[in-house]
Image (cartoon, grey):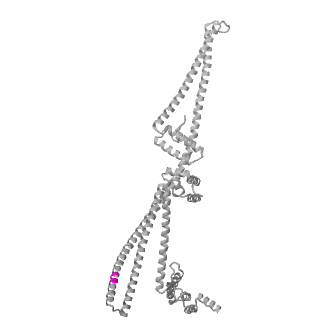
Amino acid sequence: MKNYYTVLGLSERATDEQIKQAYRMLAKRYHPDLHPGDPECARKFAMVNEAMEHIGDPASRKEYEAARIAEQKQAQAAAAQAQAQARAQAQARAQAAAAQARAQAARPAGGMYAGTAAGAASIINDTYRKGYNEGFAAAQQSFNASQNATAKSWQASAESWQKEAETRRRDLENMRRELDNLRRELDIARQHIADAEANTRRTEASLRVQTQATEDAKRRYEAEVASSAAMKETYEGKMQELENRINTEREARRFSDGDKVRLSREVTRLKEENDNLRAKLGEWEAYGESEEEDEELSAITDEWHLKIKDYKKRFKDTYYDTLGVTVWATKPEIDAAYAKTLKKLRGKENETLKTQKAEEAYKVLTDDGVRKQYNSVLGISEEEIETLRREQRDYESAQIRIEEKADANDRAAYIDELSGRAEEGDSEAAFTLGAMCLAGEEVPKDEMEAVRWFTLGAANGSTDALYHLGLCYLNGEGVNADPTRGVELIKAAAYRGNEAANVFMREAESKT
């Protein structure tokens, strides 16, 4: 009978809980789904299941123990029976020899003891001993043969158990080494988690600061809106007052030229004030929409980061964790992670064992059918994976939008800085702004604004601004075309040492 304790790598004194733990570990290790086409793993998996059927629960284990005891008692009974049969055979042979001796003693014969009672008794005793010894030797030989056969059977079973125990011992050593590696990886993972939690705390502190700043900006926006509403009411009151005055003067029909000019200027001023107010309201509305978009993008980012952290914890110590990929990773992402993992393991401690583990993980995750089965064991469906991939795309779109807004804010800050410097007399800043407005780079194309910045830069001593202002007059960009004025400005720039203006003048003179 097989020793199922040895199959599970346990002693006969193992508890029911130890048996269940050993079965779960070995069943997971040799499961055919993880080793397709491997007959040795399939054989071991079948042996583990067979052992569990016999000793996996108290009732079947009790039956198995009873069967083992009965087998041992049966072997002992067979040995005792063989010994009794040998003794009986020896006694029967001794009795037959004695009878034969009596018969010989009854016949007349010569010799030392012939015709005497002492001779007959001596012959009988000698013959009895001889028969007994021969019978006992034959019985002993039969008993020894039976014992040898039983011993050989037990020896074969013991050798089989010993081989299986050696296999289990090697598996146990491998598992111990793997457990040590997993403990070291667990320590590293715990350190990573501690670092991630520290980063999370810093991020949360930064988000609180940003949230406070957003709330302050919102309060300022609401105050500006309230102020704008008051300005609008004032404007409407003035417009109503103006309309009343116009109606009054129309009724009187006494409009002088001075009154017309004054009223026209007042109307123009009010229109400009209204336009400015509308522009300011538009700016604040755009600002409010931008703030709302920022909050939405921030919420998407925070939610995705929390989800990433949750899923990493949920699928820790799985094949996904071995390759460092998410459970929704695509095959190209798994290929790249596998190559990166192998490169990282080169020359490291336990390289062979970790490489085998990575290869096993890669084999499972790149086979669609096996991966589906594995995901089912982990408790995640294909629908959940597709939802996560869609959320990842939303997160990536949000990051692109955040970067775009950051770039736009940087550009706006740069333009504001240039404008401030130009207004303070920085001629190069004025020239840069003019070139940007003329070319439509970083800012909308505006030739009239370009002429304004070129004029300011030239007034503050920039020969580049003076040269480009001359080109604007020549080409009619932002001003009415005036070639004479343009040439005068370019000559002035050349006289002050501007290289581009000098080249322009030389080319113009060569053509004439």
| 19 up-or-down from 128: above or below | below
Q: Residue furthest right?
A: 110
Question: Residue 342: horizontal and vertical position, in percent?
Answer: 59, 57
Q: Where does the magenta region start and end?
A: 236-240
- Residue 380 position in % (x across, y down): 48, 53
The image position of residue 212, as x and y in percent, is 39, 70
Q: Nearer the viewer, residue 375 or 100?
A: 375
Q: Is residue 54 above or below residue 347?
A: above
Residue 14 lies, with reference to residue 391, above or below; the image says above
Total numbered labels placed on residues in the image: 0
For residue 78, side relative to residue 293 (left or right):
right
Q: Which percent across, then down, holds residue 134? A: 62, 19
Q: Quadrant of the C terminus?
A: bottom right
Q: Residue at x 48, y 72 (%)?
A: 406
- Residue 478 visible to an observer of this rendering: yes
Residue in the image at 34% along x and 87% along y: 246
- Residue 394 within the magenta-colored segment of the rendering: no
Q: Residue at x 48, y 63 (%)?
A: 394
Q: Is residue 239 magenta?
A: yes
Residue in front for this viewpoint, 218 or 164: 218
Magenta-drawn stretch, dominant element (helix, strand or loop): helix
Q: In the rendered image of this protein, does residue 173 appear above or below residue 416?
A: above
Residue 213 location, quadrant = bottom left
Q: Nearer the viewer, residue 206 or 403?
A: 403
Q: Is residue 5 visible?
A: no
The quadrant the N terminus occupies is top right
- The residue closer to the viewer here, 385 or 329, is 385
Q: Quadrant of residue 298?
A: bottom left
